[in-house]
Amino acid sequence: MAFTNILLLSQVAGYIVALILSLCIIVPMSLHEDEFRGHCLLFSTGNWRENDGQFVPDWSYKIYCNYTIMVGLIILFVTAIQIYRMSMLMYKGEDSSFLSAFIDVVTSIFITILTLIAAVIITLGFMTWCQCMTKRFPSCELAAGNDIDKADDINTTGFHIELGVAQFGSWSSLSIWVGLSVFATLKLLSYHQIENMKVSMYRERQRLIEAASSGQPDI
């Protein structure tokens, strides 16, 4: 029981950190979409006009930004439920069942995959945009705050910080969910081991009863 209690505490701590990190994805990506007037800079490209120095963007699909926000919302929703559920179990001095432990494993692995995809999208998509920015500016960071696209009326003031925070939140979330997947798997294996032990003890007890009823000595 001590081992399962440690796992339960580790899971609760992991879910709390994952909830906080989900906000590091949702908030900056939502701000970015608002400041860019619904456009998504991830994987967006374009060219610089020579006459006025304006950037003519070829905007990518909005689904890239929307997907990362959706993943953040899924993490926020799942972690809030798990924190409440496990806190109630700790308050009652109980632990989850074998079925709920199995569901935790499947859920953790599923969200780990979603988070990995989101992290890769943010990282590669941001690199694509920055490659265009560095054709005019020494670094992508220096492009922030410049009026580079008057036609679309975008606000570039915070895009570098916002995408940097989102990138940090996505990769950090991935590491947390890998850990949560390990914790959930260990708990499932612990339950499986306990169940096998119960079955073995039951079979041994039945063998002793049968041996006693037949008058045969124990071996």
Image: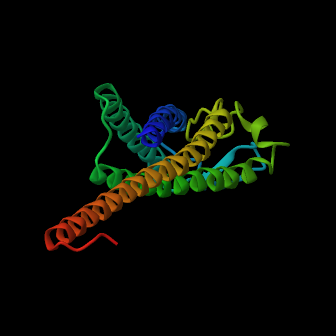
Q: Relative to 133, is 34 on the left or the right? A: left
Measured as percent of width and height from the top left, residue 141 is found at 76, 37
- Give the total number of marks visible in the rendering: 0
Query: Which is nearer the eye, 195 or 50?
Result: 195
Check the image and name the residue furthest to the left.
213
User: From where the camera sits, is residue 14 visible?
Assistant: yes
Quadrant for the C terminus, please: bottom left
Residue 100, compared with residue 15, is above or below; it is below
Q: Residue at x 22, y 74 (%)?
A: 216
Q: Relative to 92, is 131 on the left or the right? A: right
Q: Residue at x 43, y 42 (%)?
A: 4
Check the image and name the residue furthest to the right.
138
User: From where the camera sits, is residue 62 visible?
Assistant: no
Residue 62, compared with residue 15, is above or below; it is below
Q: Residue at x 36, y 53 (%)?
A: 191
Q: Residue at x 49, y 48 (%)?
A: 183
Query: Which is nearer the eye, 187 or 134?
Result: 187
Measured as percent of width and height from the top left, residue 217 is found at 27, 71
Measured as percent of width and height from the top left, residue 160 is found at 68, 37
Query: Which is nearer the eye, 185 or 108?
Result: 185
Measured as percent of width and height from the top left, residue 194 is found at 36, 55
Query: Which is nearer the eye, 41 or 200?
Result: 200
Q: Find residue 92 and report its image quarter.
A: top left
Quadrant for the N terminus, please: top left
